[in-house]
Structure formats: C-alpha cells, structure tokens
Amino acid sequence: MFEVHCDELIQALAKRAKDICNKLLARMSKDHLDANKMYVYVFFYLKCVEFLQRTDALAVHFDMANVCLFKIILQVCLV
C-alpha cells in the first residue's frame, strides 16, 4: 500500500481556478464598461442631432451626413 499526499496539488489547482475567475471577472467588467461607453456615445450623438434639427434651418441637408456619422460611431464603438 501507498499513500498519496496531494495537498500541494489541490492548493495549486485552487489558486489556478481563482486566477481564472479573476481574469473572467475583469473581462466581464471591461466588456460591460465598453458597452456602457457605446451607449453614452450613441445617446450623445442622438442628442446632438436633435439639437441641430431644432436649431439649424439646413438640417435636412445634413441628414445623410448624420447617418454616415452614426454608422462610423457604431463601427468605432463595436471594435
């Protein structure tokens, strides 16, 4: 008969699992922060467009430019 002492192995595996959990939490936090930033940018853009449409007599001419700008903002935020 023999006896296996695996306390060190168990501790190493527990540490590794904890490190993986910490990395996962950090990634989830970063992704959540990035998504929130995108929402802020989109909201700011929409408010700017709304302001321009209320104050600018030439706003109709800027509609296509606004759509293009919105697409660019979305592409930048989603990268």
Image (cartoon, rainbow, N blue to C red):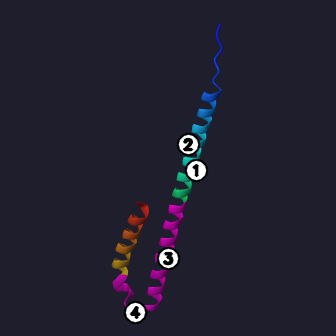
Query: Which three-letter amino acid code belongs to the residue tagged 2?
Result: Ile
Q: Is residue 1 magenta?
A: no
Q: Is residue 40 magenta?
A: yes
In primary-sequence order, the first of circles 3 and 2 is 2
In primary-sequence order, the first of circles 2 and 1 is 2
Which residue is located at x 50 percent, y 80 percent? 47
Which is more toward the observer, 14 or 68?
14
When the figure is inspected, residue 13 is found, relative to residue 6, above or below; the finding is: below
Q: What is the spatial separation of the Cα atoms under label 4 and label 1, in whole angstroms?
A: 49 Å
- Label 2 sits on a secondary structure element that is helix
The percent coordinates of residue 3 (x first, y second) are 66, 14
Query: Which three-letter amino acid code belongs to the residue tagged 1?
Result: Leu
Q: Circle 3: is it few (<14), some (14-19), or many (20+) Cα within 10 Å? A: few
Report the residue marked by disc 3: 44
Query: Which three-letter amino acid code belongs to the residue tagged 4?
Result: Ala
Main SS, magenta region, reads helix
When the figure is inspected, residue 50 is found, relative to residue 10, above or below; the finding is: below
The percent coordinates of residue 28 (x first, y second) are 55, 53
Residue 57 is tagged as 4
Q: Provide the residue span drawn in magenta.
A: 33-62
When the figure is inspected, residue 4 is found, relative to residue 15, above or below; the finding is: above
Report the residue marked by disc 2: 20
Q: Circle 1: is it few (<14), some (14-19), or many (20+) Cα within 10 Å? A: few
Q: In the drawing, does residue 73 fall left or right of residue 5?
A: left
Q: Circle 4: is it few (<14), some (14-19), or many (20+) Cα within 10 Å? A: few
Report the residue marked by disc 1: 25
Which residue is located at x 37 percent, y 90 percent? 58
Nearer the camera: disc 4 or disc 3: 3
